[in-house]
């Protein structure tokens, strides 16, 4: 990934000056305000799992390094915990920027750096669309079917079942029709 950013810098014609504006429009946040104090990276609980620091991703946006920003793992590893946002002296809402980058990456068919994380997100949303609530057991089973890795978290799953943290049957919200309608409108109306 380091090579990717270097190659973007070398090939300056790959810099996309409209990228920052696109992110501003989509997220409502201006990555250009970041002056790289590093507070966000220091406080991020998931920094070790990311290829670039949160402000590293903002730097890519500032420089118009579109492919590097859309292909990095950081945008998928970010869980939107907001730790960075409350620490940022410029009040930049970084999770909103990460979400926007994920949306653009999906819309443009960019290779997802963390497909397992995307699979899990999709199964969570499918469950909410189906029941209006998350049915954790089904989410885990469907995720495992996609991943074809049945035994990795078996001990944790059995422990959760024993402690009744996983329900065998899903519960549904009353007005499921309205919710399904919202998902349908969202799917038809996604604009990037
Ligand atoms: S805390 Fe804010 S200003 Fe500091 S590096 Fe992170 S995003 Fe930039
Ligand atoms: S919102 Fe994302 S980038 Fe910010 S601290 Fe949490 S995991 Fe890290």
Image (spheres, rainbow, N blue to C red):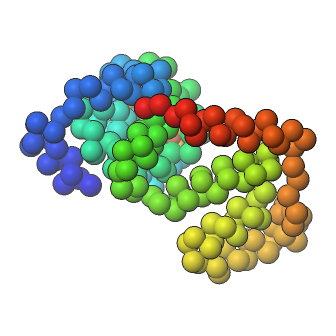
Q: Is residue 87 above or below residue 13?
A: above
Residue toward you, 76 or 54:
76
The image position of residue 40, as x and y in percent, is 45, 34
Ligand 1: which quarter?
Answer: top left
Snapshot quadrant of residue 49: bottom left
Question: At 26% from the left edge and 25% from the top edge, which residue is drawn?
Answer: 18
Would residue 98 be visible to someone looking at this image? no
Would residue 107 be visible to someone looking at this image? yes
Residue toward you, 46 or 28:
28
Left or right for 114, reference 32 = right
- Quadrant of the image containing the C terminus: top left
Residue toward you, 105 or 191:
191
- Quadrant of the image containing the N terminus: bottom left
Question: At 64% from the left edge and 57% from the top edge, which residue is drawn?
Answer: 123
**Tally of numbered discs:** 0
The image position of residue 63, as x and y in percent, is 23, 31
Q: Is residue 46 above or below residue 35?
A: below
Q: Residue furthest bottom?
A: 151
Left or right for 124, reference 117 = right
The image position of residue 107, as x and y in percent, is 42, 43
Question: At 32% from the left edge and 42% from the top edge, which residue is drawn?
Answer: 69
């Amino acid at each position: 990934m380091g090579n990717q950013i270097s190659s973007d810098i070398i090939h300056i014609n790959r810099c996309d000056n409209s990228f920052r504006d696109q992110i501003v429009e989509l997220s409502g946040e201006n990555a250009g305000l970041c002056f790289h104090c590093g507070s966000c990276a220091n406080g991020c609980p998931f920094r070790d799992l990311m290829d670039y620091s949160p402000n590293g991703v903002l730097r890519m946006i500032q420089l118009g390094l579109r492919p590097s920003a859309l292909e990095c793992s950081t945008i998928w590893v970010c869980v939107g915990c907001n730790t960075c946002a409350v620490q940022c002296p410029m009040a930049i809402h970084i999770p909103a920027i990460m979400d926007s980058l994920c949306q653009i990456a999906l819309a443009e068919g960019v290779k997802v750096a963390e497909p397992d994380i995307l699979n899990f997100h999709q199964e969570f949303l499918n469950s909410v669309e189906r029941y209006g609530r998350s049915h954790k057991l089904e989410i885990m089973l469907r995720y495992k079917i996609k991943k074809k890795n049945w035994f990795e978290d078996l001990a944790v799953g059995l422990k959760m079942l024993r402690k009744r943290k996983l329900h065998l049957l899903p519960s549904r919200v009353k007005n499921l029709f309205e919710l399904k309608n919202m998902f349908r409108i969202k799917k038809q109306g996604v604009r990037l």
